[in-house]
Image (tube, rainbow, N blue to C red):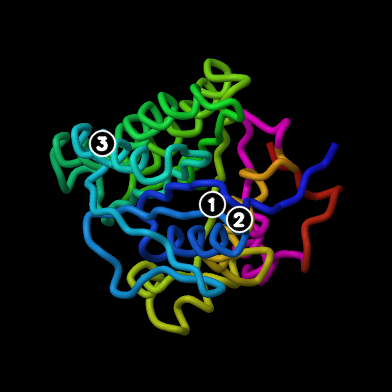
Amino acid sequence: MSGPLDLDGRVALVTGGTRGVGAGIARALLRAGARVVVCARRPPDEPVTADGRTACFRPVDVRRPAAVQLLFDELASAFGRLDLLVNNAGGAPFRLLDDADAERHARVLELNLTAPLTVSLAAHRVMRRQPAGGSVLMIGSVSGSRPSPGTAAYGAAKAGLEHLARTMAVEWAPAVRVNTLVLGMVRTESAHLHYGDTAGVAAVARTVPAGRLAEPDEIGDAVVFLASDRASYITGASLLVHGGGERPAFLAAARAHPSAPSAPSATTFEEH
């Protein structure tokens, strides 16, 4: 039987939940009634709030196992339970492979793959003892399924994260569900660092079939669904939240060529 999207009374932890996508996720969870804890290395510029409710903040570097364990000890003391973990903390600077040594690239892998594993293991030790179990969500990326020049280690980590989630889903079933949200481009307060000024963001948005970038709170809505009872049979899944992906570059190149037809036809074009 289908259940509601109401998460009233449930406890959720969002790593990297103080800004951008993470803050959007936290706001959506607050609106759904969850008690939300956000963690990051630095406190938010302002509290994460929605509908008159505020997320609790805990300072922690998720790359440090001892700090992660201390966080979960504090959560156990404060709430006595954990129903949802969202592994959102991550990211990487633009850096071509030859511009850094392996150790520096390994730090990107540590933040985007090893840290979610560390936090998930700590969460599982709590959730497996609960009658209702729990849910773990990985925030993945389309970078994990296509070449990612300039962010190769990040893309490799996201590919590994999605695979890790599928394996966790098998090993931890039926008590704990594990899924991945595979994100495309999101319009956050840092969008200009990746896509340029307003005109640059608009130009990038035109490459998306949906015609725009996602909003952080829309990512949060997808999280609420996967955390809810409506998704009780969904585990080991990857949900694409990318507005249709990216328009194939070869189509634009063909249409820009003077001798090209207005659109490829079945009789003149094949893709393999």
Going from the N terminus, do you reach mark 2 or mark 3 first?
A: 3
Q: Position of residue 251 (x, y in %)?
A: 66, 59
* 91 over 235 or under it: above or below: below
Q: Which stretch did the figure color magenta?
A: 232-261
Residue 242: image tag: 2
Type of residue at label 1? Leu
Q: Are marks 1 and 3 in contact (CB under 8 Å)?
A: no
Nearer the camera: disc 2 or disc 3: 3
Q: State the image coordinates of residue 254 (x, y, percent, origin top left).
A: 65, 62
How far apart are the two marked residues, 2 and 3, measured between alpha carbons? 25 Å
- Judging by the rendered image, the residue that carries numbered circle 3 is 110
Q: Residue 76 location in percent, x, y? A: 36, 37
Q: Which residue is mark 1?
A: 183
Disc 3 element: helix
- Under mark 2, the amino acid is His
269 horizontally vs 247: left or right = right
